Each structure stands twice: as structure tokens, then as C-alpha cells.
Image (spheres, rainbow, N blue to C red):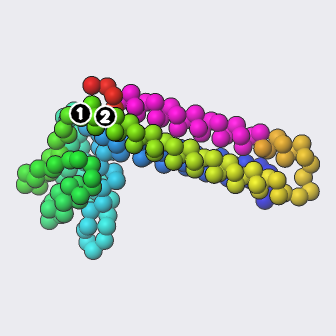
Amino acid sequence: MTLQDIVTASHDGMQKAVEATRRELSGIRSGKATTNLLDTVKVDAYGSSVPLNQVAMVTAPEPRMLAVQPFDKSLAIAIDKAIRDANLGLNPQSQGSIIRVPLPMLSEERRKELVKICSRLSEEGRIAVRQARTDAMSKIKKTEKVPEDEKTRAEKEVQKHTDDASKQIDELLKAKEAEILAV
């Protein structure tokens, strides 16, 4: 494995960590309706656990309401149960073939709690980025028959990617905190 392969692999790992953090943060309710809110919900359908977006269409017709329309009407009860059990603090209401999910107002206490959860998720993302950096640095040190100045250059490049990924995660956190704390 060449030094460039190591640097590229570490950069890819860091970008995956940033994307995972972005996905996790988008699933946290901030008071306004977003279809990403239900991305983490798994429905027991067809004998297995399936993501909600594979068995239903999720829309946000109003700022404080989500509408879930199952592709198969027989899954409405299972979808309702999955949303209740997802630990999102949502109370879906079945209306025939459509399940309406009103989003309650967030209390100040709940907003602060959500900010803490966001901070924890972003820290997990930064840990994943640092782990990718550590792996890359140890691989660079172990490479043989490569001049020291090339190793140093590769280490600096990995560090630059690490700083960029950490900055991206910090920006995601800052934006999500502002969104949550906006009344």
C-alpha cells in the first residue's frame, strides 16, 4: 500500500464519519417538520425490520406535521406502532390510509436536552475521524523503503484532512444547535 493510498483511505473514512454525523443530526427533531426525522424508524414488515422510507412515503405538508402514506395499506398499524416505539416523542394518528404525525412544541428543557444529544453525536463523529487519523498515521510509520520527508508530507496531509473533517462536524453541530434553540 502506497502512502497516497493510505492518505486517500483515511480521507474516505473521515468523510464517512462526517456523513454519518450529518445523518444522525438530521434525525433529531428541532421543532419543525422534516422528512429526515423518521429516517431512523424501522418497521416490522414482511417478516423483517425495514426502514420506514421503503414501505411508506413521508411528506411534510405543514410546518408542524408529517404525513406518512404506506405503499401497502395493511402496514398502517405496523407503521403507527414503529413510530410510537422509535423513542422520538411522537404520537401518530391513523386516519385511514394516511398516518399524521403532529410535532409538539419543544419545551426549553427538552431543547437543552436535544443540544446535549447533538453534542454527544458530534463528539462520536470526531472520535471516528480521530480513529481514521490514528490508523493512517500508524500505517504511514510502518511503511518501509519510503523517504522520511515523504512520510512527513503524508502525515501533514492526513492531519489536514482531520482538521477539515473536524471543522465540518463543528459546523454541522453549530447549525443544528441554532435550529433547535430557535423558538
**How many residues crowd mark 2 within 10 Å: few (<14), some (14–19), many (20+)?**
many
Tell me which amino acid carries mark 1.
Ser
Residue 117 located left or right of residue 125: left
Residue 54 in the image, given as x and y percentages of width and height: 31, 58
Which SS class for mark 1? loop
Residue found 32% across the figure and 64% down from its top: 50
Q: Considering only vertical position in the picture, is 114 above or below 132?
A: above
Residue 26 in the image, given as x and y percentages of width and height: 38, 42
Residue 69: image tag: none
Residue positioned most to the left: 96
Whether residue 169 appears in magenta in the rendering, the answer is yes
Which SS class for mark 2? helix
Residue 70 in the image, given as x and y percentages of width and height: 19, 57
User: Badge 1 is on which residue?
Assistant: 107
**Magenta stretch?**
156-179
User: Is there a contact, CB below 8 Å, between mark 2 and mark 1?
Assistant: yes
